[in-house]
Amino acid sequence: MVLDRPEVTVSEKPPRAPLSGSRKPRRTMRPTAVRLGLMAVPLAFFGVFFAYPVAAIVSRGLREDGRWQLGRIGDVLGDPATLHVLWFTTWQALASTALTLALALPGAYVFARFDFPGKRLLRAVVTVPFVLPTVVVGAAFLALVGRGGLLDELWGVRLDTTVWAILLAHVFFNYAVVVRTVGGLWAQLDPRQEEAARVLGAGRFAAWRRVTLPALAPAVAAAALMVFLFTFTSFGVVQILGGPRYSTLEVEIYQQTAQLLDLPTAAVLTLVQFVAVAVLLVVHGRTVRRRESALRLVDAARTARRPRGAAQWTLLGSVLAVVALLVLLPLAVLVLRSFDGPDGYGLAFYRALASAGDNGGTFVVAPLEAIGNSLGYALAATGIAVVVGGLAAAALTRRGSRLTRGFDALLMLPLGTSAVTVGFGFLITLDEPPLDLRTSWILVPLAQALVGVPFVVRTMLPVLRAVDARLREAAAVLGASPLRAWREVDLPMVARALGIAAGFAFAVSLGEFGATVFIARPDSPTLPVAVARLLGRPGELNYGQAMALSTILMLVCAAALLVLERVRTDRSGEF
């Protein structure tokens, strides 16, 4: 996933020499051995904390009295209700992805090529929905489109229990994925290449289609893949806005596991979801990544300019209107609800967060303590994700082999696997020595890092592949070891991407809910878990506290993302 890239051009100077006191190049390890060494840590991490828990859950569901009950698979797949759930899951994911691309690609262009007041703040704001818990977003949209909501009061229109509410909420979630993935690359594409095509006689659209679009294709495909994965595994949005009429695989897995206690059916549905995601990743790897190539990238600060002409100002106004209606309005409703107390607007709900006794015994500790817990967990998860994801991205720099493609697909699987399955898997597998982590605080960051690693890899990998291989060869000729060549050549060029990856992993960790809700200790809840507990209890006070805590989570995420926007580049455009 590409969020931003450092300047990489064919005219980059080789690293300073000498890197070593020797005139003769050192004997280095074979590339395959180096890749295997880099893969060791990510493979161990995913094997212990992803493959093992998921396999344990599936095994328990499909084994009875020591025998595999494979006939259960045919029974579940032959059920018309299962086929309907699978069809709706796929259909709504495709529709959500198409609608998100249609609305967000113009925004990606505006953020990449235009310079306007408040751009940095707005880019941070549009990223906030992506890290909010799904239950919070579902409640906010319910206040907009449900019974007694804003649309109902103004025009008598209700969209709850319809597919349109689900689709709009998915666009709200994933708008930032397209803007930051595609816009980050678009901002650094050298516009002179397209201008050269126009000088040679190509029209504006033909030059864009033949020059810019092929360069953007990997980023667009990566964004589409991420959006599809998130919507394919949608849980909270569908459960709240879809009502009993609509159900995705993730919702059905939760219902079969937590409500009906039908673990065999849940295991079969988990396998179906797992296979579907694996097939998607294989197709993506064969069709998109072949088009990745070294690009001529320039400083993003030199490509953005103020809009000129009526058409560009109209485009900017249209994008700002979409952001205001689709992103800012739900967030504004969330904030207003947090201040709308029983005695009018005030801070009553915020004051109640400081006491554990004001919420009917929902918490062992005051809900306000969830802020410190979330920040601590997110920092630890970010460190784990950066180390694991950085090693994985370095191992994937050389592309083409089956080993590389398989490893790359493995890293993406946590995004398409049921979080409910992963959470229950942690509980039943990490409960005895040498991995008895049930009472350890590290369990939550480990679960959050599983989601953060794919973001780190998708951010850093295209940048590493864009580094001119001749620079590494020059370092080797000057006597540098592979490690030193990476430190002197690759690291300075990917520093900006590394910072962006860490920031995104931190934000995603703050809002992770699916697995954390099963493993967070009662005395150490995270912000999303605390919000879910408050929303699960009746009463105006609990609902108001949930809105207040959600507002705090939104502000924390916005502050983290805004700091990232400010420190990611200096005046020269370097990290």
Image (cartoon, grey):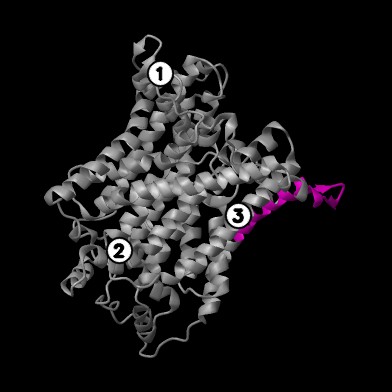
82 or 39: nearer the eye?
Answer: 82
Q: CA distance from mark 3 to mark 1?
A: 46 Å
Residue 442 drawn at (x, y percent): 56, 45
Depth order, front residue of 562/536: 536
Q: Secondary structure at mark 1?
A: helix
Helix, strand or loop at mark 3:
helix
Q: Nearer the viewer, residue 569 or 55?
A: 55
The first of marks 3 and 2 along the sequence is 2
Q: In the image, what residue type sits under mark 2?
A: Pro
Q: Which residue is mark 3?
A: 276
Label 2 – label 1 distance at C-alpha: 45 Å
Looking at the image, which is closer to me, 391 or 257? 257
Q: Which residues are magenta?
A: 44-73
Pair 2/1: label in front: 2
Q: What secondary structure is found at the residue carrying circle 2?
A: loop
Q: Quadrant of the N terminus?
A: bottom left
Query: Which quadrant is home to the C terminus?
Result: bottom left
Q: Is residue 170 left or right of residue 313?
A: right
**58 drawn magenta:** yes
| Left or right, residue 253 beside residue 61 | left
> In which quadrant of the rendered view does residue 471 lie?
bottom left
Disc nearer the start of the sequence (2/1): 2
Dot 3 surroundings within 10 Å: few (below 14), some, or many (20 or more)? some
The answer to whether the residue labelled 2 contacts the one labelled 1, judged by CB atoms less than 8 Å apart, is no
Rendered position, 538 above or below 178:
above
Residue 202 visible, this orientation: yes
Label number found at residue 351: 1
Q: Amino acid at mark 3?
A: Ala
Question: Dot 2: within a 10 Å radius of its alpha carbon, few (fewer than 14), some, or many (20 or more) residues?
Answer: many
